[in-house]
């Protein structure tokens, strides 16, 4: 099978997620040139991107909780008219 950047990115994402067994199996399927696997690459890529994003969100939430920051507040509820500073 010719070099496919999308397939290679799957292996990189799997290793980034510490799924080394899956990364090895994916590399083996890429070498075999399985047509069913080739058709599944876009779906697998989207799933891995979603997993990476979800892990990042959970990590940030955990770090924020661990740091014991106060509750998140934005400026939409702030009343500038009541402040003394111009």
Image (tube, rainbow, N blue to C red):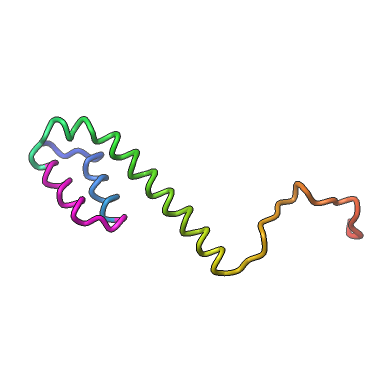
Q: Is residue 21 left or right of residue 72?
A: left
Provide residue 45's location: percent of width, then percent of height. Answer: 30, 40
Provide residue 40's location: percent of width, then percent of height. Answer: 23, 33
* Magenta-tinted stretch: 16-30
Magenta stretch, overall SS: helix
Provide residue 73's location: percent of width, then percent of height. Answer: 70, 55
Q: Which residue is drawn at 24% across and 36% down?
A: 41
Determine whether 3 is above or below 18 in the image.
Answer: above
Provide residue 22's location: percent of width, then percent of height. Answer: 20, 50
Q: State the image quarter where residue 15 is shown.
A: bottom left
Q: In this view, does 44 lie to the left or right of 74?
A: left
Residue at the left extreme of this rendering = 32
Number of numbered discs visible in the structure rendering: 0
Magenta highlight on residue 25: yes
Question: 19 or 38, which is in the foreground?
Answer: 19
Q: Which residue is drawn at 20% across and 51% down?
A: 23
Determine whether 26 is above or below 1 in the image.
Answer: below
Q: State the image quarter where residue 5 is shown.
A: top left
Magenta highlight on residue 61: no
Q: Quadrant of the C terminus?
A: bottom right
Q: Residue at x 56, y 64 (%)?
A: 65
Residue at the bottom extreme of this rendering = 67
Q: In this view, does 60 lie to the left or right of 52?
A: right
Q: Which residue is drawn at 28% across and 39% down?
A: 44
Determine whether 67 is above or below 73 in the image.
Answer: below
Q: In which quarter of the image is the N terminus?
A: top left
């Amino acid at each position: 099978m010719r070099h496919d950047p999308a397939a290679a990115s799957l292996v990189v994402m799997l290793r980034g997620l510490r799924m080394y067994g899956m990364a090895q199996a994916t590399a083996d399927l890429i070498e075999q040139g399985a047509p069913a696997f080739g058709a599944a690459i876009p779906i697998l890529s989207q799933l891995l991107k979603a997993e990476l994003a979800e892990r990042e969100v959970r990590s940030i939430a955990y770090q924020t909780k661990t740091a014991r920051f106060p509750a998140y507040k934005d400026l939409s509820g702030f009343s500038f008219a009541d402040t003394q500073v111009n």
